[in-house]
Image: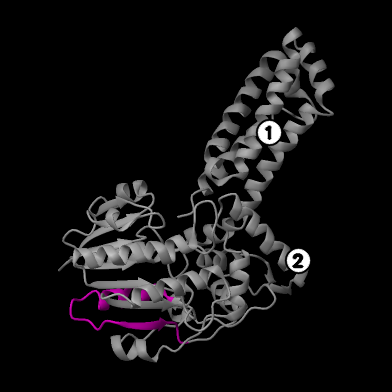
Amino acid sequence: MGRILIVGATGLIGSHVAAALADGGHEVTGVARDVRAAGRAIASMCWISLDMGHARPADWSAALADVDAVVNCAGALQSGPADDLFGTHARGLAALVAACETAGVRRFIHFSAMGVDRATPTEFSRSKHAGDEKLMASTLDWVILRPSVVLGPAAYGASALVRGLAALPVLPVMPATAPLQPVALEDVVATVLFFAAPKAPARLALELAGPDRLAFTELVRLFRRWLGHAPAREIVLPAWLAGLLYRLGDAAGRLGWRPPVRSTARREIARGAVGDTAPWHRITGITPRSMAAMLAAGPASVQEKWFASLYLLKPVVLVSLALFWIGSGLASLGPGYAPGIALMQQGGAGALAPLAVVGGGLADLAIGIGICVRRSARLALTGGIAVALFYALAGSVLTPWLWLDPLAPLLKIAPVIALHLCALAMLRDR
């Protein structure tokens, strides 16, 4: 058994590869930008915090000491505040490859993407292809794996979106989508285990795909049946509405979120993800399973059904809360300013009334804007709970009659806090 370094070890593929290798007796070190939660969850593995997109060859020297093989699972869909595609897929990969050559690490298993050797319509595919070229030009014993859409028990990115859509009673169908050959996560992991062996074949690129070519709607139907739902009504979205959804996804991406529906996904699914799996089967002996077989092997649990139902509610909840706080702040500083002053003075605030109304309005605005930005969302949601509790306490002291008001302004604080707690519970992406 050897020592193996997994880069991107907290992602969908990387986490399962790391677990399988560790279970097989290998000494596994996981690398990711943030390894705090992973280190607590899997204390038996060694963890290193390192951002591949900004790492230089020298930054890898300690991590590569006595390593027998490297598995690179790092990747992102679209550039944004937290992601630089060429930094991660090309420049960062080149630095890691150079460090491996210096350290004497020979075996290098790299995850690319299906079809990047045939067409590069996006920054995602161009950066993936550039990284592949750099790796193939090296002296390492490299293996490039180019999977189609990877689906399995874990849900993240496309796999989460499919589950979320499968839970809707009405399925919105995006126009201009090409067929997919989704591949089971278990088969992808088995492939890495095969090539991690010291004497396994090297210096080859393989496409990993399932046996069935499916339209995206067919894939969603499979998952819907798996969840136990009756067939959904399907509505093809007009091109303008689909375009608006992709642009909204891009806007969310610029705020640090990582929605699966963005302009990169639009162009990538338009070309599809199908390939030739014969070389993969011939070299490894792995016979890929169909999605129907994969789903049949693991019946949907109540957790799966909860996740599918809640997935698309997450952006609805976050947007609703952001609009609630921003709207409240604008109302306090605008048309509601004079009524707010009168109410505060009625409760005995006196000269402090203007300061309280303005301060409350600014606090509301800060919370709403903070919820919009991924990096500050958790702090803003926590702050929203604290401010809501303060409003309930202050209202009880200054305007206790509002508890009996027909519009229930103070009673409504309880469901608002509950919605914040739901948002906090759903905030983590992986």
Question: Which residue lies under the disc numbered 2?
Answer: 241
In the image, 206 versus 215, the foreground residue is 206
Q: Amino acid at mark 2?
A: Leu
Percent position (x, y) of residue 41? Answer: 32, 50
Q: Amino acid at mark 1?
A: Leu
State left or right for residue 168 relative to residue 158: right
Percent position (x, y) of residue 2? Answer: 16, 67
In the image, 115 versus 165, the foreground residue is 115
Instruction: Give the vertical position of 368 relative to 227 (above or below).
Output: above
* Quadrant (top left, top right, bottom left, bottom right) of the C terminus: bottom left
**Residue located 55% across and 61% down the image:** 308
In the image, 7 versus 208, the foreground residue is 7
| Range shown magenta | 184-211
- What is the secondary structure assignment of the residue under circle 2? helix
Q: Which mark is residue 365?
A: 1
* Quadrant (top left, top right, bottom left, bottom right) of the N terminus: bottom left
Q: Can residue 314 be seen at all in this image of the molecule? A: no
In the image, 114 versus 169, the foreground residue is 114
Q: Quarter of the image holding residue 336?
A: top right
Q: Residues within 10 Å of mark 1 (few under 14, many from 20)?
A: many
Q: How many numbered callouts? A: 2
User: Residue 192 magenta-drawn?
Assistant: yes
Marks 2 and 1 sit apart, C-alpha to C-alpha, by: 29 Å
